[in-house]
Amino acid sequence: GVGMGMTAPVSITAFPAEDGSFEQKVKVSLRIPSQFQDNPPCPTDESIKIEERQEMTIYSTQFGGYAKEADYVNYAAKLKAALGSDAAYRKDFYFCNGYDPPMKPYGRRNEVWFVKE
């Protein structure tokens, strides 16, 4: 019953398939605004869970435009190539982040994050 508004980034946890595309399971995460973090309202929908994301170090790349799955997959492949074989990061998932509302046509910001092991 409490409206919190939209937050940024909207973060999608992608689980890559063998060919690099997303598996059918994805998890969408929204940041709880600061004023609600100590005591967040309880979700009324059982499919919504409140999770605390632990501190992490990431490898990141940024790109613009209206991001689609193919864009995230492409930039994840570019980040993987740039890091080479020496970088230790989680291979079983990565984060796809969008920072802008849908009605913002220019100057959009998207990122792919790999979590350092």
Image (cartoon, grey):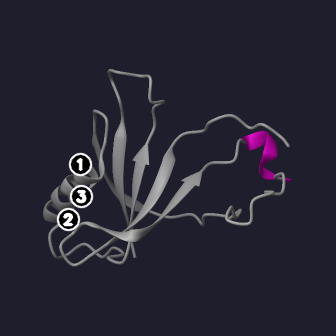
Which residue is under mark 2? 80
Q: Position of residue 6 (x, y in %)?
A: 62, 36
| In this view, the mark in front (1 or 2) | 1
| Marks 1 and 3 in Cβ contact (< 8 Å) | yes
Which residue is under mark 1? 71
Dot 1 alpha-carbon crowd within 10 angstroms: few under 14, some 14 to 19, many 20 or more: some
Dot 2 alpha-carbon crowd within 10 angstroms: few under 14, some 14 to 19, many 20 or more: some
Q: CA distance from mark 1 to mark 2?
A: 14 Å
Which residue is under mark 3? 73
Location of residue 99 with respect to 29 vertically, above or below: above
Dot 2 or dot 3: first in sequence order is 3
Horizontal relation, residue 78 to residue 56: left or right? left
Tell me which amino acid carries mark 2. Lys
Quarter of the figure with the N terminus: top right
Image quadrant assignment for residue 73:
bottom left
Tell me which amino acid carries mark 1. Asp
Q: Secondary structure at mark 3?
A: helix
Q: Secondary structure at mark 1?
A: helix
Horizontal relation, residue 20 to residue 90: left or right? left
| Marks 2 and 3 in Cβ contact (< 8 Å) | no
Residue 36 painted magenta: yes
Quarter of the figure with the C terminus: bottom left
